[in-house]
């Protein structure tokens, strides 16, 4: 059992100096619900407003219902936040949603893992949608994992109207989204999940893979220095040349969720002995990588030569989600001359749109060279879904879907060269 002491030590919500247990009375916030699930593990739900919200490293916080966190300054997830799937007795089949908003920055070096929508395998049953995660801040760092929840599974057979599995949860980031390190630098257990923003997988038959998109509606000004969330040693006093501008911060990567498998065709009947065709697989999720950060302006060292502008950073890579496999064809009616149904067509892959390269920084006076623009990220199309298996006997396999598209992204423009020092 996770004790209350452990939960309160793991999560610190600062307004002055407050722990989470006190926050429900701060500034008229909607009270936070600190409850227990059926296993006695403490959970978190509701709305939190505070100055800063921190989940400490090596600690895990469980989310039992919709959660909104609004921080005046920063939200930092160094540990893990895990969203529960909805219980059988819950009114909604959809997994809880999560919204994180901060006035300055949001940093995720740990994991945010969305919950799976509830399954409903009854006749005409419909699964629940997976957790969607909404993140908004002027600057967002994602060195760990933010993953939408998988969609729940619906009825295992076709029906009229068609039943469906639910959609995978999306990850939407509003702000400038960066990453500080490649996948290879992450802990081994996280590399299996991949790093960055990941949409949830769709449920069976018609569940769409979740998107993972950086909506870059705020721009960091050229040359603006961004405080990195990692330790950078101070520059020593022994400087033999005027320093160059800092390089930009790479854009975050994004991976789309996989589309669901198409529905299985109905078996033949005595009146209509041929098996029915399987349904079409669902398209994979479309994603957009984060933009590369701008290079910093160089420092003036007049009358000596100035430094060169910093290079703009590479944009984030984006990989579209794979299309779902076509549904299996239905079997012919036993003992008849009927044939099995044709497998369904595979779903198309999702579109991967990479992030654009960052702008180069300006050179300093005197005669500092311009910073180079950053390269765009790499876009990869989602894989085509394979065709469905044939029904028995004598059915045909379905055709494969088409691969996803690749969106365009431009490299960053170069900075300007430094002028002459003032006379």
Image: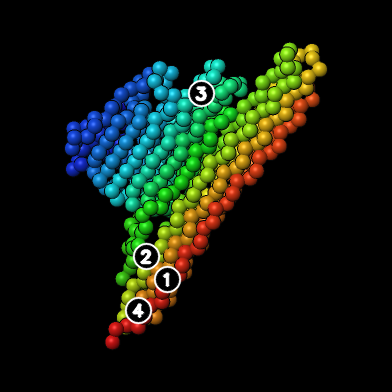
Q: Residues within 10 Å of mark 4 (few under 14, many from 20)?
A: many
* Circle 4 SS class: loop
Q: What is the distance, in whole Å, between disc 4 and disc 2 at their CAs?
A: 17 Å
Question: Which residue, as the protein is rendered here, is positioned at the far bottom?
Answer: 423
Question: Relative to 274, is 260 on the left or the right?
Answer: left
Quarter the N terminus occupies: top left
**SS type, badge 2:** loop
Instruction: Indicate which disc, 1 or 2, sits on the residue closer to the N terminus.
Output: 2
Residue at the far right in the pictured view: 337
Discs 4/3, front:
3
Where disc 1 sits, the SS reads loop
Quick one: SS at disc 3?
Answer: loop
Q: Residue at x 42, y 43 (%)?
A: 172
Q: Position of residue 6 (x, y in %)?
A: 31, 31
Query: Quarter of the image containing the C terminus?
Result: bottom left
| Labels 4 and 3 touching (C-beta < 8 A) | no
Which of disc 2 and disc 4 is earlier in sequence?
Answer: 2
- On the image, numbered disc 4 is attached to which residue? 365
Q: Residue visible at 69% across and 27% down? A: 277
Quarter of image, res 111: top left
Q: Give left or right: position of 131 versus 20.
A: right
| Residue located at (51% from left, 53% from top) | 354
Disc 1 target residue: 415
| Mark found first going from the N terminus, 4 or 3 | 3
Say the numbered circle drawn on residue 222. 2
Q: Using a 10 Å C-alpha cutoff, classify the residue at mark 1 as few (fewer than 14 neighbours), some (14 to 19) or many (20 or more).
A: many
**Comparing labels 4 and 2, the label whose residue is closer to the camera:** 2
Whichever of callouts 4 and 1 sits on the residue coming sooner in the sequence is 4
Q: Which residue is mark 3?
A: 126
């Amino acid at each position: 059992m996770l004790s209350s002491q452990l939960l309160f030590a793991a999560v610190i919500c600062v307004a002055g100096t407050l722990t989470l247990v006190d926050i429900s009375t701060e500034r008229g916030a909607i009270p936070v619900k600190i409850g227990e699930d059926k296993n006695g593990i403490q959970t978190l739900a509701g709305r939190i407003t505070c100055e800063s919200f921190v989940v400490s490293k090596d600690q895990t916080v469980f989310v039992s219902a919709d959660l909104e966190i609004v921080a005046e300054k920063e939200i930092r997830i160094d540990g893990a936040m895990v969203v529960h799937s909805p219980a059988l007795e819950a009114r909604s089949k959809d997994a809880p949603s999560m919204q994180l908003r901060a006035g300055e920055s949001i940093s995720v070096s740990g994991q945010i893992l969305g919950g799976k929508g509830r399954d409903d395998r009854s006749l005409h049953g419909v699964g629940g949608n997976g957790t969607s995660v909404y993140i908004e801040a002027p600057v967002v760092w994602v060195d760990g994992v933010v993953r939408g929840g998988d969609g729940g599974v619906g009825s295992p057979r076709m029906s009229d109207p068609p039943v469906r599995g639910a959609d995978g949860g999306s990850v939407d980031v509003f702000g400038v989204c960066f990453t500080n390190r490649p996948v290879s630098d992450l802990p081994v257990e996280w590399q299996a999940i991949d790093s960055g923003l990941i949409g949830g997988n769709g449920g069976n038959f018609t569940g769409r893979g979740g998107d993972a998109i950086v909506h870059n509606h705020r721009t960091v000004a050229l040359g603006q220095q961004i405080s990195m969330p990692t330790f950078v040693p101070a520059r020593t006093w022994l400087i033999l040349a005027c320093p160059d501008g800092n390089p930009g911060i790479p854009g975050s990567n994004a991976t789309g969720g996989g589309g669901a498998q198409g529905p299985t065709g109905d078996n033949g009947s005595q009146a209509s002995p041929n098996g029915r065709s399987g349904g079409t697989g669902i398209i994979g999720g479309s994603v957009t990588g984060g933009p590369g950060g701008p290079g910093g302006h160089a420092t003036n060292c007049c009358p000596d030569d100035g430094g060169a502008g910093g290079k703009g950073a590479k944009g984030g890579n984006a990989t579209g989600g794979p299309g779902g496999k076509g549904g299996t064809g239905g079997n012919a009616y036993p003992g008849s001359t009927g044939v099995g149904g044709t497998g369904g067509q595979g779903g198309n892959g999702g579109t991967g749109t990479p992030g654009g390269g960052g702008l180069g920084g300006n050179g300093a006076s005197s005669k500092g060279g311009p910073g180079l623009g950053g390269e765009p990220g790499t876009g990869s199309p989602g894989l085509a879904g394979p065709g469905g298996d044939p029904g028995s006997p004598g059915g045909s396999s379905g055709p494969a879907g088409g691969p996803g598209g690749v969106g365009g992204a431009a490299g960053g423009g170069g900075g300007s060269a430094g002028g002459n020092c003032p006379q």
